[in-house]
């Protein structure tokens, strides 16, 4: 699943209204590939900008220079599981998704940290390790999770972790060098419970309370409780369209913010895809991407 969240930051990390901020928050920051970005540049908002609908998070210039990446893209790909402990089957086709995600975010200027088949302990260790890194010179953070899941949980190879807990590692109070910066989570998880039919009403949809994590964008491949489709030969509907939409934007020389891109992804997944299982309970099923955002500015992936 894919999801977005906004957290109300501790007061020490809250944006400060300033008539003349040191760096205008709506403009890219950087210069030479070695330029570091001050953490404070994300905490100042000019009074004239507070109502600006086009206000964007600061961005690193020259993001394609490997010595000056936009930020870290943490890619966790769970293909195999301890069936005795989790009851989950192998996720055939997920490596296809992982490969295209890695290529896409490298092209966007991110340093991709890819991990496969993590136990719960190793997953939490990795999250803690990335949280403790110095993200001061980066302008954002991306996390892509490819796994099984159920009711707000994501599977490691031998257990589950709560999605809210996973996201909480990168709250501004736990990862100060990402304070005020967009933290974007793209989660491909199949709840494996209900199939979304093209004529289904909203009565069966599950509504969950979202955490209020500041500047966090979480996109789920489907609504909580519904199936997210994946093809063993071509990958998942959501991840494949996500990467296609990002690439198309790049190829056209455009740069739309992440919310606009996800609107296109959601539309394409909803209209272009339909299951073909031949089984009464799942044939001709659809999928609807779910996005929750509490971003306070526009966030760009490239």
Image (cartoon, rainbow, N blue to C red):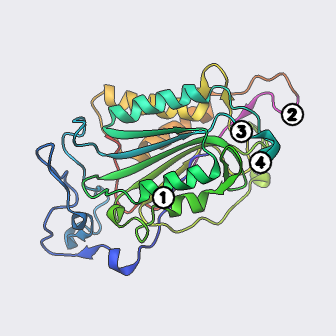
Of labels 2 and 3, earlier in sequence is: 3
10 Å crowding of disc 2: few (<14), some (14-19), many (20+) = few
In the foreground, 229 or 166: 166
Residue underneath mark 3: 81
Q: Main secondary structure of the magenta part?
A: loop
Residue farthest toward the top in the current orientation of the protein: 233
Q: Quadrant of the C terminus?
A: top left
Cα separation between marks 1 and 4 = 41 Å
Cα separation between marks 1 and 2 = 41 Å
Residue underneath mark 2: 281
Of labels 1 and 2, earlier in sequence is: 1
Residue underneath mark 4: 201
Q: Is residue 239 left or right of residue 250?
A: right
State the image coordinates of residue 250 (x, y, percent, origin top left): 32, 30
Looking at the rendered image, the disc whose residue lies closer to the viewer, 2 or 3, is: 3
Above or below for 131 versus 77:
below
Say which quarter of the image contains residue 46. Answer: bottom left
Is 288 in the magenta? Answer: yes
Of labels 1 and 4, earlier in sequence is: 1
Span of residues in magenta = 280-291
Q: Regarding mark 3 in the picture, which secondary structure is present there?
A: loop
């Amino acid at each position: 699943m894919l999801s977005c969240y906004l957290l109300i930051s501790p007061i020490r990390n809250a944006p400060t209204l300033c008539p003349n901020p040191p760096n205008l928050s709506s403009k890219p920051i950087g210069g030479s590939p070695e330029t570091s970005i001050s953490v404070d540049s994300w905490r100042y908002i000019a009074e004239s900008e507070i109502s600006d609908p086009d206000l964007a998070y600061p961005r690193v210039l020259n993001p394609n220079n490997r010595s000056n990446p936009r930020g870290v893209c943490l890619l966790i790909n769970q293909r195999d599981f301890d069936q005795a402990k989790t009851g989950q089957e192998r996720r055939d086709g997920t490596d296809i998704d992982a490969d295209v995600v890695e290529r896409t975010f490298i092209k966007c200027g991110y340093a991709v940290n890819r991990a496969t088949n993590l136990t719960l302990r190793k997953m939490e260790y990795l999250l803690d390790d990335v949280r403790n890194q110095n993200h001061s010179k980066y302008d954002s953070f991306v996390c892509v999770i490819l796994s099984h899941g159920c009711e707000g949980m994501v599977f490691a190879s031998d257990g589950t972790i709560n999605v809210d807990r996973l996201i909480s590692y990168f709250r501004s109070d736990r990862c100060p060098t990402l304070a005020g910066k967009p933290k974007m989570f793209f989660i491909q998880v199949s709840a494996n419970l209900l199939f979304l039919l093209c004529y289904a009403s909203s009565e069966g949809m599950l509504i969950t309370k979202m955490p209020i994590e500041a500047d966090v964008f979480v996109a789920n491949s489907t609504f909580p409780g519904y199936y997210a489709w994946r093809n063993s030969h071509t990958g998942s509907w959501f991840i494949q369209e996500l990467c296609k939409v990002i690439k198309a934007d790049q190829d056209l020389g455009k740069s739309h913010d992440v919310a606009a891109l996800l609107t296109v992804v959601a539309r394409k997944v909803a209209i272009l895809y339909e299951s073909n299982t031949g089984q009464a309970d799942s044939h001709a099923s659809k999928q609807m991407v779910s996005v929750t955002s509490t971003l306070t500015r526009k966030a760009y992936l490239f």
